[in-house]
Image (cartoon, rainbow, N blue to C red):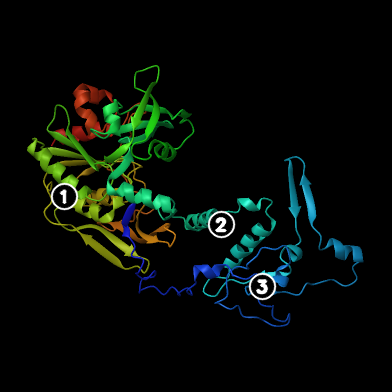
Amino acid sequence: MTQQPPHDPNAPLWPAAMTEPAMPAVDPAALWPASATPPQPPPADASPTPDPSAPFWPATYAAAPLAAEAAPWVQPQAVRRRGGLPSVAKVLGVIVLSVVVFAGGIAVGKSDSTVAGGGTAVIAPAGLPSQFSTYMEAWKVLHDNFVDPGALDPTKLVYGSVNGLIEAVGDTGHTRFLTPDQVKEQHTALSGSIVGIGALMNTDQATPIIQSVIPGGPADRAGLRSGDKVLEIDGVSTAGQDIDSVVKHIRGDAGTTVKLSVLHEGDTAPTSYSIVREQVTVPAVAWAMIPGTTIADLRLEEFSNGSAKEVKDAIVAAKKAGATAMVLDLRGNPGGYVGEAVDIASQFIRDGVVFQQRDRTGKVTPSPVTPGGEALDLPLAVLVDLGTASSGEIVAGAIQDAKRAQLIGHKTFGTGTVLNEFGLKDGAALLVGTVEWLTRDGRQIWKQGIEPDIALESDPAGKVVPPGDLAKLGAAGLAKAGDAPLLKAIELLKAK
Protein backbone atom coordinates (compact mmCIF):
# COMPACT_ATOMS: atom_id res chain seq x y z
CA MET A 1 0.00 0.00 0.00
CA THR A 2 1.62 3.22 -1.13
CA GLN A 3 -0.12 6.02 0.69
CA GLN A 4 0.01 9.73 1.11
CA PRO A 5 -0.90 11.25 4.49
CA PRO A 6 -4.65 11.82 5.06
CA HIS A 7 -6.29 14.31 2.73
CA ASP A 8 -7.04 17.74 4.13
CA PRO A 9 -10.88 17.82 4.43
CA ASN A 10 -10.80 21.57 3.83
CA ALA A 11 -8.98 21.14 0.52
CA PRO A 12 -11.01 20.90 -2.70
CA LEU A 13 -12.07 17.38 -3.62
CA TRP A 14 -11.15 17.82 -7.27
CA PRO A 15 -7.70 19.11 -8.39
CA ALA A 16 -7.77 22.41 -10.25
CA ALA A 17 -6.56 20.71 -13.44
CA MET A 18 -9.59 18.46 -13.59
CA THR A 19 -12.74 19.31 -15.44
CA GLU A 20 -14.99 17.13 -13.32
CA PRO A 21 -18.33 18.93 -12.87
CA ALA A 22 -19.01 19.97 -9.31
CA MET A 23 -21.77 18.14 -7.48
CA PRO A 24 -24.46 20.31 -5.90
CA ALA A 25 -24.05 20.87 -2.19
CA VAL A 26 -26.39 18.61 -0.30
CA ASP A 27 -27.18 18.90 3.38
CA PRO A 28 -27.04 15.31 4.75
CA ALA A 29 -30.13 16.08 6.80
CA ALA A 30 -32.01 16.84 3.59
CA LEU A 31 -31.49 13.33 2.19
CA TRP A 32 -34.61 12.35 4.10
CA PRO A 33 -37.54 14.79 4.06
CA ALA A 34 -38.92 15.82 7.40
CA SER A 35 -42.46 15.42 6.14
CA ALA A 36 -44.07 12.47 4.47
CA THR A 37 -46.28 14.78 2.40
CA PRO A 38 -44.34 15.55 -0.77
CA PRO A 39 -45.45 17.99 -3.44
CA GLN A 40 -48.03 16.94 -5.99
CA PRO A 41 -46.88 15.56 -9.35
CA PRO A 42 -47.03 17.66 -12.47
CA PRO A 43 -49.72 16.93 -15.06
CA ALA A 44 -49.25 13.71 -17.01
CA ASP A 45 -48.73 15.61 -20.25
CA ALA A 46 -45.98 17.79 -18.80
CA SER A 47 -42.22 17.17 -18.84
CA PRO A 48 -41.24 18.09 -15.27
CA THR A 49 -37.72 19.20 -14.42
CA PRO A 50 -36.42 17.71 -11.14
CA ASP A 51 -35.77 20.28 -8.43
CA PRO A 52 -32.05 19.85 -7.55
CA SER A 53 -32.68 21.26 -4.07
CA ALA A 54 -35.37 18.68 -3.33
CA PRO A 55 -34.49 15.63 -1.16
CA PHE A 56 -33.27 12.45 -2.87
CA TRP A 57 -35.61 10.11 -1.04
CA PRO A 58 -39.29 10.18 -0.04
CA ALA A 59 -39.94 10.43 3.68
CA THR A 60 -41.76 7.11 3.94
CA TYR A 61 -41.66 3.75 2.27
CA ALA A 62 -45.40 3.14 2.15
CA ALA A 63 -46.75 0.46 -0.16
CA ALA A 64 -48.75 3.00 -2.16
CA PRO A 65 -47.67 3.61 -5.81
CA LEU A 66 -44.94 6.18 -6.34
CA ALA A 67 -47.30 8.38 -8.35
CA ALA A 68 -49.43 8.85 -5.23
CA GLU A 69 -46.34 9.89 -3.24
CA ALA A 70 -45.45 12.40 -5.93
CA ALA A 71 -41.79 12.58 -4.89
CA PRO A 72 -39.88 15.26 -6.80
CA TRP A 73 -37.47 12.70 -8.28
CA VAL A 74 -40.11 10.54 -10.00
CA GLN A 75 -41.70 11.25 -13.33
CA PRO A 76 -45.22 9.83 -13.87
CA GLN A 77 -45.66 7.81 -17.02
CA ALA A 78 -48.95 6.94 -18.67
CA VAL A 79 -49.90 3.28 -18.23
CA ARG A 80 -50.32 1.83 -21.72
CA ARG A 81 -53.26 -0.53 -22.35
CA ARG A 82 -53.96 -2.51 -25.50
CA GLY A 83 -57.53 -2.23 -26.80
CA GLY A 84 -59.67 -5.34 -27.30
CA LEU A 85 -58.24 -7.41 -24.46
CA PRO A 86 -60.72 -9.37 -22.37
CA SER A 87 -61.26 -7.86 -18.93
CA VAL A 88 -59.66 -10.87 -17.25
CA ALA A 89 -56.45 -10.23 -19.24
CA LYS A 90 -56.42 -6.63 -18.02
CA VAL A 91 -56.54 -7.92 -14.48
CA LEU A 92 -53.81 -10.53 -15.07
CA GLY A 93 -51.60 -7.85 -16.58
CA VAL A 94 -51.26 -6.04 -13.25
CA ILE A 95 -51.25 -8.84 -10.67
CA VAL A 96 -48.14 -10.54 -9.28
CA LEU A 97 -47.09 -13.63 -11.22
CA SER A 98 -45.39 -16.36 -9.16
CA VAL A 99 -43.07 -19.05 -10.40
CA VAL A 100 -42.08 -21.86 -8.06
CA VAL A 101 -38.78 -23.58 -8.87
CA PHE A 102 -39.27 -26.95 -7.25
CA ALA A 103 -35.91 -28.49 -8.21
CA GLY A 104 -33.96 -25.85 -6.29
CA GLY A 105 -36.51 -25.35 -3.55
CA ILE A 106 -36.84 -21.68 -4.47
CA ALA A 107 -40.07 -19.70 -4.83
CA VAL A 108 -39.53 -16.82 -7.23
CA GLY A 109 -42.07 -13.98 -7.34
CA LYS A 110 -42.24 -11.81 -10.45
CA SER A 111 -43.91 -8.41 -10.12
CA ASP A 112 -45.30 -6.38 -13.00
CA SER A 113 -43.26 -3.17 -13.13
CA THR A 114 -46.36 -0.98 -13.40
CA VAL A 115 -47.46 -2.19 -9.98
CA ALA A 116 -44.07 -2.39 -8.19
CA GLY A 117 -43.06 1.02 -9.46
CA GLY A 118 -46.49 2.62 -9.59
CA GLY A 119 -46.00 3.38 -13.28
CA THR A 120 -43.17 5.82 -12.57
CA ALA A 121 -39.58 6.41 -13.63
CA VAL A 122 -36.91 7.52 -11.16
CA ILE A 123 -34.88 10.59 -12.12
CA ALA A 124 -31.31 11.00 -10.87
CA PRO A 125 -30.62 14.27 -9.01
CA ALA A 126 -28.91 17.06 -10.91
CA GLY A 127 -25.15 16.63 -11.07
CA LEU A 128 -25.26 12.82 -10.97
CA PRO A 129 -25.27 10.47 -13.98
CA SER A 130 -28.62 9.12 -15.15
CA GLN A 131 -27.56 5.61 -14.09
CA PHE A 132 -27.82 6.72 -10.44
CA SER A 133 -31.60 6.52 -10.79
CA THR A 134 -31.24 2.72 -10.94
CA TYR A 135 -29.61 2.72 -7.51
CA MET A 136 -32.34 4.95 -6.09
CA GLU A 137 -35.01 2.71 -7.57
CA ALA A 138 -33.36 -0.43 -6.16
CA TRP A 139 -33.12 1.17 -2.69
CA LYS A 140 -36.85 1.95 -2.75
CA VAL A 141 -37.87 -1.48 -4.04
CA LEU A 142 -35.81 -3.13 -1.31
CA HIS A 143 -37.35 -1.01 1.46
CA ASP A 144 -40.88 -1.44 0.11
CA ASN A 145 -40.71 -5.19 -0.33
CA PHE A 146 -38.01 -6.97 1.71
CA VAL A 147 -39.58 -9.46 4.10
CA ASP A 148 -37.45 -8.40 7.10
CA PRO A 149 -37.47 -4.59 7.38
CA GLY A 150 -35.41 -4.77 10.58
CA ALA A 151 -32.47 -6.13 8.58
CA LEU A 152 -32.28 -2.98 6.46
CA ASP A 153 -29.63 -1.17 8.45
CA PRO A 154 -28.92 2.10 6.59
CA THR A 155 -25.23 2.22 7.56
CA LYS A 156 -24.59 -1.36 6.44
CA LEU A 157 -26.46 -0.79 3.19
CA VAL A 158 -24.59 2.41 2.39
CA TYR A 159 -21.18 0.95 3.32
CA GLY A 160 -21.95 -2.13 1.21
CA SER A 161 -22.94 0.12 -1.68
CA VAL A 162 -19.75 2.15 -1.44
CA ASN A 163 -17.68 -1.05 -1.32
CA GLY A 164 -19.37 -2.19 -4.52
CA LEU A 165 -18.71 1.19 -6.10
CA ILE A 166 -15.01 0.98 -5.29
CA GLU A 167 -14.67 -2.66 -6.36
CA ALA A 168 -16.18 -1.83 -9.75
CA VAL A 169 -13.25 0.50 -10.45
CA GLY A 170 -10.98 -2.54 -10.76
CA ASP A 171 -8.04 -1.29 -8.66
CA THR A 172 -8.32 -4.47 -6.59
CA GLY A 173 -6.60 -4.46 -3.21
CA HIS A 174 -5.57 -0.81 -3.46
CA THR A 175 -8.24 1.83 -4.03
CA ARG A 176 -10.74 0.93 -1.34
CA PHE A 177 -13.28 1.99 1.27
CA LEU A 178 -12.52 1.99 4.99
CA THR A 179 -15.09 2.06 7.77
CA PRO A 180 -14.33 4.37 10.72
CA ASP A 181 -12.89 1.43 12.70
CA GLN A 182 -10.71 0.38 9.76
CA VAL A 183 -9.42 3.95 9.39
CA LYS A 184 -8.29 3.89 13.04
CA GLU A 185 -6.66 0.47 12.61
CA GLN A 186 -4.72 1.60 9.55
CA HIS A 187 -3.48 4.80 11.14
CA THR A 188 -2.39 2.78 14.17
CA ALA A 189 -0.55 0.22 12.01
CA LEU A 190 1.32 2.89 10.07
CA SER A 191 2.25 4.68 13.29
CA GLY A 192 4.43 1.69 14.22
CA SER A 193 2.60 1.04 17.48
CA ILE A 194 -0.17 -1.49 18.15
CA VAL A 195 -1.94 -3.19 21.04
CA GLY A 196 -1.45 -6.94 20.92
CA ILE A 197 1.01 -9.68 21.83
CA GLY A 198 3.95 -8.44 19.73
CA ALA A 199 4.00 -11.08 17.00
CA LEU A 200 3.95 -10.75 13.22
CA MET A 201 1.59 -13.28 11.64
CA ASN A 202 1.63 -15.08 8.31
CA THR A 203 0.24 -18.31 6.85
CA ASP A 204 1.78 -21.64 5.95
CA GLN A 205 -0.45 -23.83 3.75
CA ALA A 206 -3.53 -21.97 5.05
CA THR A 207 -2.45 -22.41 8.69
CA PRO A 208 -1.70 -19.18 10.62
CA ILE A 209 1.87 -19.12 11.89
CA ILE A 210 4.00 -16.69 13.84
CA GLN A 211 6.41 -15.18 11.32
CA SER A 212 8.48 -13.41 13.96
CA VAL A 213 8.14 -11.96 17.47
CA ILE A 214 9.01 -8.45 18.63
CA PRO A 215 12.00 -8.66 20.98
CA GLY A 216 10.93 -8.02 24.56
CA GLY A 217 7.21 -8.10 23.70
CA PRO A 218 4.54 -10.29 25.36
CA ALA A 219 4.88 -13.12 22.81
CA ASP A 220 8.66 -13.14 23.17
CA ARG A 221 8.44 -13.24 26.97
CA ALA A 222 5.88 -16.05 26.84
CA GLY A 223 8.20 -18.21 24.73
CA LEU A 224 6.53 -18.04 21.32
CA ARG A 225 8.87 -18.17 18.34
CA SER A 226 9.02 -18.02 14.57
CA GLY A 227 7.26 -20.91 12.85
CA ASP A 228 4.79 -21.66 15.67
CA LYS A 229 1.35 -22.67 14.36
CA VAL A 230 -1.63 -20.96 16.01
CA LEU A 231 -4.37 -23.60 16.24
CA GLU A 232 -6.91 -21.90 18.53
CA ILE A 233 -7.67 -18.42 19.83
CA ASP A 234 -9.76 -18.28 23.02
CA GLY A 235 -10.92 -21.83 22.36
CA VAL A 236 -12.00 -21.15 18.75
CA SER A 237 -10.24 -23.03 15.96
CA THR A 238 -8.35 -20.95 13.41
CA ALA A 239 -9.12 -23.48 10.65
CA GLY A 240 -10.76 -21.72 7.72
CA GLN A 241 -10.03 -18.22 9.04
CA ASP A 242 -8.10 -15.77 6.88
CA ILE A 243 -5.05 -14.06 8.33
CA ASP A 244 -6.88 -10.75 8.87
CA SER A 245 -9.48 -12.49 11.07
CA VAL A 246 -6.77 -14.25 13.05
CA VAL A 247 -4.91 -10.99 13.69
CA LYS A 248 -8.13 -9.23 14.67
CA HIS A 249 -8.95 -11.90 17.26
CA ILE A 250 -5.45 -11.91 18.73
CA ARG A 251 -5.43 -8.13 19.11
CA GLY A 252 -7.56 -6.43 21.75
CA ASP A 253 -7.52 -3.88 24.53
CA ALA A 254 -4.37 -3.42 26.58
CA GLY A 255 -4.52 -5.37 29.83
CA THR A 256 -6.85 -8.08 28.53
CA THR A 257 -5.82 -11.71 28.11
CA VAL A 258 -5.87 -13.87 25.00
CA LYS A 259 -5.56 -17.66 25.20
CA LEU A 260 -3.69 -19.39 22.40
CA SER A 261 -3.20 -23.03 21.50
CA VAL A 262 0.16 -23.22 19.72
CA LEU A 263 2.01 -26.07 18.05
CA HIS A 264 5.79 -25.61 18.14
CA GLU A 265 7.88 -26.96 15.29
CA GLY A 266 8.89 -30.53 16.07
CA ASP A 267 6.22 -31.01 18.76
CA THR A 268 3.37 -33.50 18.42
CA ALA A 269 0.99 -31.84 20.89
CA PRO A 270 0.00 -28.16 21.18
CA THR A 271 0.90 -25.92 24.13
CA SER A 272 -1.54 -23.50 25.73
CA TYR A 273 -0.60 -19.89 26.49
CA SER A 274 -2.38 -17.06 28.29
CA ILE A 275 -0.84 -13.77 27.18
CA VAL A 276 -1.74 -10.29 28.40
CA ARG A 277 -2.04 -7.78 25.57
CA GLU A 278 -0.11 -4.53 25.80
CA GLN A 279 0.99 -1.54 23.75
CA VAL A 280 3.83 -2.74 21.55
CA THR A 281 6.11 -0.63 19.41
CA VAL A 282 6.63 -2.52 16.17
CA PRO A 283 10.01 -1.81 14.57
CA ALA A 284 9.76 -1.50 10.81
CA VAL A 285 13.34 -2.72 10.49
CA ALA A 286 15.24 -5.73 11.81
CA TRP A 287 18.82 -6.63 10.98
CA ALA A 288 21.52 -9.13 11.94
CA MET A 289 24.84 -10.39 10.67
CA ILE A 290 24.56 -13.62 8.68
CA PRO A 291 26.48 -16.37 10.51
CA GLY A 292 29.90 -17.15 9.02
CA THR A 293 29.93 -14.03 6.82
CA THR A 294 30.46 -10.29 6.90
CA ILE A 295 27.05 -9.79 5.22
CA ALA A 296 24.25 -7.96 7.04
CA ASP A 297 20.63 -9.08 6.53
CA LEU A 298 18.25 -6.07 6.76
CA ARG A 299 14.53 -6.76 6.63
CA LEU A 300 11.93 -4.00 6.14
CA GLU A 301 8.42 -4.97 7.27
CA GLU A 302 6.54 -1.86 6.07
CA PHE A 303 7.04 1.77 5.12
CA SER A 304 5.58 3.18 8.32
CA ASN A 305 6.18 6.57 9.84
CA GLY A 306 9.90 6.87 10.65
CA SER A 307 10.98 3.69 8.85
CA ALA A 308 13.54 5.55 6.72
CA LYS A 309 15.40 6.67 9.85
CA GLU A 310 15.32 3.09 11.16
CA VAL A 311 16.85 1.84 7.89
CA LYS A 312 19.56 4.50 8.01
CA ASP A 313 20.38 3.69 11.66
CA ALA A 314 20.49 -0.05 10.87
CA ILE A 315 22.95 0.50 7.99
CA VAL A 316 25.23 2.59 10.22
CA ALA A 317 25.10 -0.07 12.96
CA ALA A 318 25.77 -2.90 10.48
CA LYS A 319 28.83 -1.14 9.07
CA LYS A 320 30.17 -0.60 12.59
CA ALA A 321 29.66 -4.34 13.21
CA GLY A 322 31.90 -5.10 10.23
CA ALA A 323 29.37 -5.53 7.41
CA THR A 324 30.98 -5.41 3.96
CA ALA A 325 27.79 -6.26 2.04
CA MET A 326 24.04 -6.24 2.66
CA VAL A 327 20.85 -8.11 1.82
CA LEU A 328 17.73 -5.91 1.69
CA ASP A 329 14.70 -8.15 2.31
CA LEU A 330 11.44 -6.63 1.00
CA ARG A 331 9.45 -9.89 0.91
CA GLY A 332 5.90 -9.59 2.22
CA ASN A 333 6.21 -5.80 2.49
CA PRO A 334 2.77 -4.30 1.66
CA GLY A 335 4.03 -0.72 1.32
CA GLY A 336 3.18 2.39 3.29
CA TYR A 337 4.09 6.05 3.00
CA VAL A 338 5.64 7.00 -0.32
CA GLY A 339 7.89 9.65 1.26
CA GLU A 340 9.53 6.94 3.37
CA ALA A 341 10.11 4.90 0.19
CA VAL A 342 11.97 7.79 -1.47
CA ASP A 343 14.22 8.26 1.57
CA ILE A 344 14.93 4.52 1.89
CA ALA A 345 15.79 4.08 -1.80
CA SER A 346 18.09 7.09 -1.44
CA GLN A 347 20.21 5.18 1.09
CA PHE A 348 21.35 2.92 -1.77
CA ILE A 349 21.20 5.15 -4.89
CA ARG A 350 23.61 8.06 -5.37
CA ASP A 351 21.65 10.34 -7.70
CA GLY A 352 18.93 10.58 -10.33
CA VAL A 353 15.26 9.69 -9.82
CA VAL A 354 13.66 7.21 -7.42
CA PHE A 355 10.36 6.99 -9.31
CA GLN A 356 8.02 9.00 -11.51
CA GLN A 357 4.36 9.70 -10.93
CA ARG A 358 1.79 10.25 -13.66
CA ASP A 359 -1.55 11.87 -12.86
CA ARG A 360 -4.89 11.39 -14.63
CA THR A 361 -4.10 14.20 -17.09
CA GLY A 362 -0.90 12.46 -18.19
CA LYS A 363 1.44 14.89 -16.46
CA VAL A 364 4.64 13.12 -15.26
CA THR A 365 6.52 14.36 -12.20
CA PRO A 366 9.85 12.81 -11.11
CA SER A 367 10.73 12.19 -7.45
CA PRO A 368 14.48 12.74 -7.13
CA VAL A 369 16.95 10.92 -4.91
CA THR A 370 17.66 12.52 -1.54
CA PRO A 371 21.46 13.03 -1.34
CA GLY A 372 23.61 11.55 1.43
CA GLY A 373 22.78 7.83 1.48
CA GLU A 374 24.61 5.54 3.93
CA ALA A 375 25.05 2.48 1.67
CA LEU A 376 25.90 3.95 -1.73
CA ASP A 377 28.89 1.67 -2.35
CA LEU A 378 28.00 -1.34 -0.19
CA PRO A 379 27.51 -4.49 -2.34
CA LEU A 380 23.78 -5.24 -2.26
CA ALA A 381 21.18 -7.90 -3.11
CA VAL A 382 17.40 -7.35 -2.83
CA LEU A 383 14.80 -10.04 -2.04
CA VAL A 384 11.25 -9.66 -3.41
CA ASP A 385 8.13 -11.81 -3.74
CA LEU A 386 4.44 -11.57 -4.61
CA GLY A 387 3.85 -9.87 -1.27
CA THR A 388 6.18 -7.00 -2.21
CA ALA A 389 3.81 -4.19 -3.17
CA SER A 390 3.47 -0.47 -3.67
CA SER A 391 6.24 1.39 -1.81
CA GLY A 392 8.20 -1.88 -1.78
CA GLU A 393 7.99 -1.90 -5.57
CA ILE A 394 9.10 1.73 -5.75
CA VAL A 395 12.32 0.87 -3.88
CA ALA A 396 12.90 -2.42 -5.74
CA GLY A 397 12.27 -0.80 -9.13
CA ALA A 398 14.57 2.12 -8.39
CA ILE A 399 17.44 -0.15 -7.33
CA GLN A 400 16.94 -2.42 -10.35
CA ASP A 401 16.76 0.45 -12.88
CA ALA A 402 19.85 2.07 -11.37
CA LYS A 403 21.64 -1.28 -11.81
CA ARG A 404 22.59 -0.98 -8.18
CA ALA A 405 21.74 -4.59 -7.27
CA GLN A 406 20.00 -7.72 -8.55
CA LEU A 407 16.47 -8.59 -7.45
CA ILE A 408 16.05 -12.20 -6.32
CA GLY A 409 12.81 -14.09 -5.77
CA HIS A 410 9.32 -13.82 -7.26
CA LYS A 411 7.61 -11.18 -9.41
CA THR A 412 6.14 -8.41 -7.25
CA PHE A 413 2.43 -7.70 -6.78
CA GLY A 414 2.01 -4.84 -9.27
CA THR A 415 0.12 -2.23 -7.28
CA GLY A 416 1.50 0.84 -8.99
CA THR A 417 -0.76 3.63 -7.75
CA VAL A 418 -0.26 6.12 -4.95
CA LEU A 419 -3.19 6.47 -2.57
CA ASN A 420 -4.65 9.64 -1.14
CA GLU A 421 -6.96 9.33 1.84
CA PHE A 422 -10.23 11.26 1.53
CA GLY A 423 -11.99 11.42 4.89
CA LEU A 424 -15.78 11.20 4.98
CA LYS A 425 -18.00 12.99 7.49
CA ASP A 426 -18.81 9.92 9.59
CA GLY A 427 -15.16 8.96 10.08
CA ALA A 428 -15.01 6.53 7.16
CA ALA A 429 -12.61 7.18 4.30
CA LEU A 430 -11.85 6.42 0.69
CA LEU A 431 -8.31 5.46 -0.23
CA VAL A 432 -8.14 6.50 -3.88
CA GLY A 433 -5.33 5.89 -6.35
CA THR A 434 -4.82 9.45 -7.57
CA VAL A 435 -1.54 9.01 -9.44
CA GLU A 436 0.14 6.09 -11.14
CA TRP A 437 3.80 5.52 -10.47
CA LEU A 438 6.45 4.51 -12.95
CA THR A 439 9.95 3.23 -12.20
CA ARG A 440 13.06 5.36 -12.51
CA ASP A 441 13.29 4.42 -16.22
CA GLY A 442 9.56 4.90 -16.85
CA ARG A 443 8.38 1.28 -16.64
CA GLN A 444 4.72 0.79 -15.79
CA ILE A 445 4.22 -1.43 -12.73
CA TRP A 446 0.44 -1.20 -12.26
CA LYS A 447 -1.00 -4.70 -12.81
CA GLN A 448 2.38 -5.77 -14.24
CA GLY A 449 4.70 -6.13 -11.28
CA ILE A 450 8.48 -6.15 -11.34
CA GLU A 451 10.26 -9.22 -12.65
CA PRO A 452 13.26 -10.26 -10.55
CA ASP A 453 16.68 -10.60 -12.14
CA ILE A 454 16.91 -14.09 -10.64
CA ALA A 455 13.57 -15.90 -10.34
CA LEU A 456 13.78 -18.21 -7.37
CA GLU A 457 11.20 -19.65 -4.98
CA SER A 458 11.80 -20.86 -1.45
CA ASP A 459 11.71 -24.61 -0.99
CA PRO A 460 8.11 -25.81 -0.46
CA ALA A 461 9.04 -27.03 3.01
CA GLY A 462 11.18 -23.98 3.73
CA LYS A 463 10.34 -20.62 5.24
CA VAL A 464 11.37 -16.97 5.17
CA VAL A 465 14.13 -16.64 7.73
CA PRO A 466 13.92 -13.32 9.62
CA PRO A 467 17.08 -11.65 10.93
CA GLY A 468 16.11 -12.50 14.50
CA ASP A 469 16.49 -16.23 13.77
CA LEU A 470 19.94 -16.10 12.17
CA ALA A 471 22.05 -16.31 15.33
CA LYS A 472 19.93 -19.17 16.68
CA LEU A 473 20.12 -21.14 13.42
CA GLY A 474 23.80 -20.68 12.77
CA ALA A 475 25.35 -21.29 9.35
CA ALA A 476 24.37 -24.97 9.26
CA GLY A 477 20.80 -24.30 10.36
CA LEU A 478 20.37 -21.53 7.81
CA ALA A 479 21.52 -23.84 5.02
CA LYS A 480 18.83 -26.36 6.03
CA ALA A 481 16.04 -23.81 6.53
CA GLY A 482 15.07 -23.77 2.86
CA ASP A 483 15.11 -20.00 2.33
CA ALA A 484 16.48 -20.32 -1.21
CA PRO A 485 16.39 -16.59 -2.15
CA LEU A 486 18.34 -15.61 0.95
CA LEU A 487 20.91 -18.37 0.35
CA LYS A 488 21.28 -17.22 -3.29
CA ALA A 489 21.85 -13.63 -2.16
CA ILE A 490 24.57 -14.79 0.23
CA GLU A 491 26.21 -16.76 -2.57
CA LEU A 492 26.25 -13.74 -4.90
CA LEU A 493 27.58 -11.34 -2.30
CA LYS A 494 30.33 -13.71 -1.18
CA ALA A 495 31.59 -13.76 -4.76
CA LYS A 496 32.04 -9.96 -4.84
Left or right: where 69 falls relative to 314: right
**Three-letter amino acid code at the position of disc 1:** Gln
Q: In the displayed image of the protein, which residue is found farthest to the top? A: 268
Query: In this view of the protein, which residue sits in the foreground, 187 or 211?
Result: 187
Q: Indicate the secondary structure of the residue bearing disc 1.
A: loop
* Residue 82 visible, this angle: yes
Where, by quadrant of the figure, is residue 130 drawn?
bottom right
Residue at image coords 43%, 73%: 20
Q: Indicate the secondary structure of the residue bearing disc 3.
A: loop
Q: Which residue is mark 3?
A: 37
**Foreground tag (1 vs 3):** 3
- Mark 3 surroundings within 10 Å by alpha-carbon count, few (fewer than 14), some (14 through 19), many (20 or more): few
Question: Is 112 situated above or below 202?
Answer: below
Residue at image coords 40%, 17%: 269
Residue 90 screen position, x and y as percent = 86, 65
Q: Which residue is mark 2?
A: 154
**Three-letter amino acid code at the position of disc 2:** Pro
Q: CA distance from mark 1 to mark 2?
A: 50 Å
Residue 323 screen position, x and y as percent = 11, 36
Q: CA distance from mark 3 to mark 2?
A: 22 Å
CB under 8 Å between callouts 3 and 2?
no
**Foreground tag (1 vs 2):** 2
Q: Which residue is mark 1?
A: 347
